[in-house]
Amino acid sequence: MRRGGVELWRWQRDQWFVAYSRALDGILVRWGMRPELHLLLVILPPLLLMVALGLALSGSLLGLPYLLLLVGSLIYSEGRGNLRQQVDEYLEFWRFADGVAAGRSARAFATDARRLVPKALASLHRFAVDGLLYRAFTQWFAVVFWLALLGPGGAFGYRLLHLYLAHTDACAVRNRDRLQAALFYIDWIPARALGFAFAVVGNFANCYPVWRQQLAVQGRSAPIFLRYCGVAALSDAETLACQGRNEGARRPEALARSAEQIRELMILLRRSRVAWWLGIVVLDVAL
C-alpha cells in the first residue's frame, strides 16, 4: 500500500506475530490442546491488549492518544505488499500471453497462495480477477469497515486472522479450515457492502440485479461474490463470461480486452474507496 508516495507496507513488521504464534502453537501441541482452541489462544492475547489500550487512551488528552492509536492500527492492519505493482507485473506478462510468468505474478495477489494456478489463459484471468478483488478487499475495505465498527481492536484482530492463516503450518489443516470458516462469516457483511458500492460507483443497471441475485445464494464466498459484482459493475460486463466460454482464446484482441478489464477493476476499486468513506461518514452522523 502507498500513501503520499510512502510505501506503508515497509512499516509493517510481522516477525513478532509469526514467532509468537508458532511458539505458542508448539506449546499447545505439546500440551495436547484441541486444534480449534489454538485460534482463540493465539489471537485473543494481542487482541485483548489492543482493546485494553484503546479503552485506556479513549478518555485522555481530548482523545488525541486514541486518534493516534486509530491511525497506527489502520496503518498496521492494511494488507501487505504493493498490490498495484503486482498487478502491473501481471499485466506485463499477460500482454505477451506468457501464461507461466503471468501465473507466478497472479499468485502474489491470489486469494489462496496454496491454490493451483490455472494454465489456460481464460481460467487464469478469472483466477487473477478473484485474487485482485479479494486482496483489495482484505487489504483496505474490510480493515476500514471493522475499524469504523469496532475501533482499533476490530482492524487489528482482522489482520491477525489473515496473518495467522498465511503462516499456519501445512500440518494444521483442521486449524486452517476453522480459520477460513471464521473468515467467511467475518467477511460476509463487508463483502456485501462492497458489492453494493460497486453498483453505486459503476454500472448500477447491470450490477444491482447481480448483487441481489448473489445475495440470495447461500454459502457464496467473498471472492466469488465480489467477482460477480465487480465484473457486472464494469461497462463491458460480458467480457468474463465470453472468455469463460472460450478457454482457448489467445487472440490479441481477447488478451487486450482481459487486460483492460483488470485496469477497469482497479479504477472501480479506487472509486469504491470514496463511496466507502462517504458511507462510513453518513452512518456515523446518522447513528
Image (cartoon, rainbow, N blue to C red):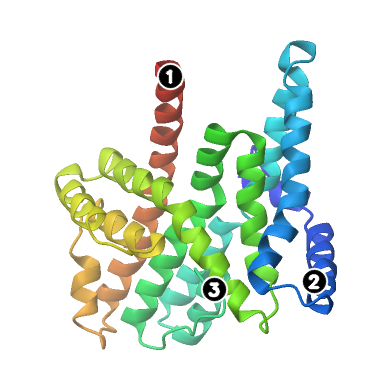
At x 80%, y 71%, the residue is 28
Q: Nearer the viewer, residue 80 or 144?
A: 144
Q: Is residue 98 left or right of residue 161?
A: left
User: As displayed, is residue 50 above or below residue 24?
Assistant: above
Q: Residue at x 73, y 27 (%)?
A: 55
- Residue beneath the point at 27% across and 38% down: 200
Q: Amino acid at mark 3?
A: Asp
**Residue 287 x %, y %:** 43, 19
Q: CA distance from mark 3 to mark 2?
A: 18 Å
Quarter of the image for residue 185 reads bottom left
Q: Dot 2, crowdedness within 10 Å: few (<14), some or many (≥20)?
A: some
Circle number at residue 287: 1
Q: Nearer the viewer, residue 146 or 5?
A: 146
Q: CA distance from mark 1 to mark 3?
A: 36 Å
Identified by mark 2, the residue type is: Leu
Q: Nearer the viewer, mark 2 or mark 1?
A: 2
Q: Position of residue 109 (x, y in %)?
A: 54, 66
- The label number, if any, that marks residue 177 in the structure image: 3
Q: Earlier in the sequence, mark 3 or mark 2?
A: 2
Residue 28: which numbered mark, if any?
2
| Relative to 31, 147 lies left or right | left
On screen, 7 above or below 115?
above
Work out whether residue 109 can be spotted.
no
Q: Position of residue 174 (x, y in %)?
A: 59, 77
Q: Which element is circle 2 on?
A: helix
Nearer the observer, disc 3 or disc 2? 2
Pinpoint residue 221: horizontal percent, then vertical percent.
Answer: 38, 64
Quadrant position of residue 198: top left
